[in-house]
Image (tube, grey):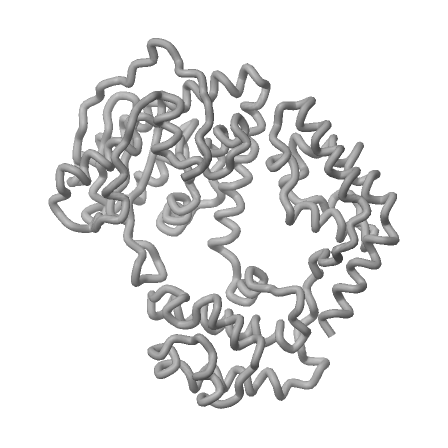
Amino acid sequence: MTDMFAFPKPPNRPIPTLPIRWVETDDELYALIDEIDDVDVVALDTEFVRRTTYYPILALVQVNTGKGIYLVDAPKLDLSEFWQALSEVPTMLWYACGEDLTIFYHLAKCPPLTNIIDIQIGIAYLTSLMQVGYAQAVFEVLGVTLDKAESQSDWLVRPLSDNQQNYAISDVQYLPTLYEVIKETLVAKNLFDCVIEDSLLYAKEIHTALHTPNEQVYLDYLDPKYNQRQITLLQALTSWRERLARVKNKPRTFIIDKQGLRDIIDTMPTTTKALANTSINRNALRRYGDDIVRIIKQVTSLPKEQLITLPPPPYTSKNKPFKKELSQALAAHSQATQIPESLLMRGRWLNQLLYMIYQELDDEHLPDGLKGYRHEWVIAHILPLLREYKEQIADGFILGNNQRG
């Protein structure tokens, strides 16, 4: 469990008692859509199954409109108009919405949502804790203990057990009240707009990840030690795996898991016997071994000029002469704004800033996360600080490129 945090218990903050309704017919769904059209805030959660499929199977959508709590029996219904109504409501409340939005985007086929508030992000701004779970947040903020024993149960079974139903209801029952308390505290600290910005940034990142072309999936598995041929093989294998996983609707890990992928890239086996010495699972070896070996042979035979262009390297040098001054700048701005240091600067944003210094790129190349409320601070303080170490930063990137071979 995440470290406990102290949060003032709000006085006299009762949880509204709302009617609970199942939505199993088109008429019931249209009635819910009409209600969603009439409110400004909707709290949501989903239950799904994704153990043996590439695409998650949506089993249940929980909706709290402030007028009622609805359990939408997703497999029975065409939810196209439902997704559209939710896209248009002024505010959608979620808690740790990553997987929920992945399903939303997959089924709704919509652009990035612009009405999202992720309450977990709000709690991170108030506590510096990045992964506070919903049950812990409800307990710490509202003083309510939730039973999470049903989190891994079979949500496609019908009828749901009483425990499953109570679990599903609780996932949205407390969200609006939790939001009210968190919002009041954020507004008092002038941090609410920051949470909105980061929630929308997160929603955009999830949409981008879901729509990543097969040929770019390899970027999530890069290792600074990989040379150009290894990276070419990584791209070829992850593109092939992505296409196969989607066609067969199987998890990527059923084909090659992360460790198996690393082993193959490290050793580049050109026979099925050598491939069997990696950690690839036996079923995958039997089904796909010949295809994997064929891809490896194709890449190993490519002339150097046909290998892919190396992506920008990460800054891997242990020599970080700017580290102390950067830490001081982060601490000073955190103290002045009450924004936790971990939320002011992510590691990948810093790497992009270092790459900008190395390549002498202008400010328009800032990552999206540094173009909002962080922008003025980064332009006025962080980039000038890093530019003082331009030569050392360049040496770090050159060293990383040389290590790739």
Which residue in the rendered view is the most extreme toward the top?
Answer: 12
Residue drawn at the location 44% of the way across and 68% of the way down: 257
Query: Looking at the picture, how far across and down is residue 313, in whole percent?
Result: 71, 61
Counting from the top left corner in percent of width and height, residue 168 is at 24, 37
Rendering coords of residue 299 (x, y %): 59, 82
Q: Is residue 35 left or right of residue 125?
A: left
Picture layout, residue 146 above or below residue 227: above
Q: Is residue 20 left or right of residue 13?
A: left
Q: Nearer the viewer, residue 366 or 319?
A: 319
Which residue corresponds to the image point at 44% horizontal and 75% vertical from the top-left?
279
Image quadrant assignment for residue 34: top left
Between 149 and 93, the one lying in front of the other is 149
On the question of residue 389 being in view, the answer is: yes
- Extreme left residue here? 159
Residue 401 position by quadrant: bottom right
The residue lying at 40 percent from left, 47 percent from top is 99
For the C terminus, give its image quadrant.
bottom right
- Where 362 sits versus 38, above or below? below
269 to 62, vertically: above or below? below
Image quadrant holding the N terminus, namely top left
Q: Residue at x 53, y 46 (%)?
A: 205
x and y, in percent, of residue 196 in the image: 53, 29
Query: Can residue 40 be seen?
Result: no
Q: Nearer the viewer, residue 17 or 13?
A: 13
Q: How many marks?
A: 0
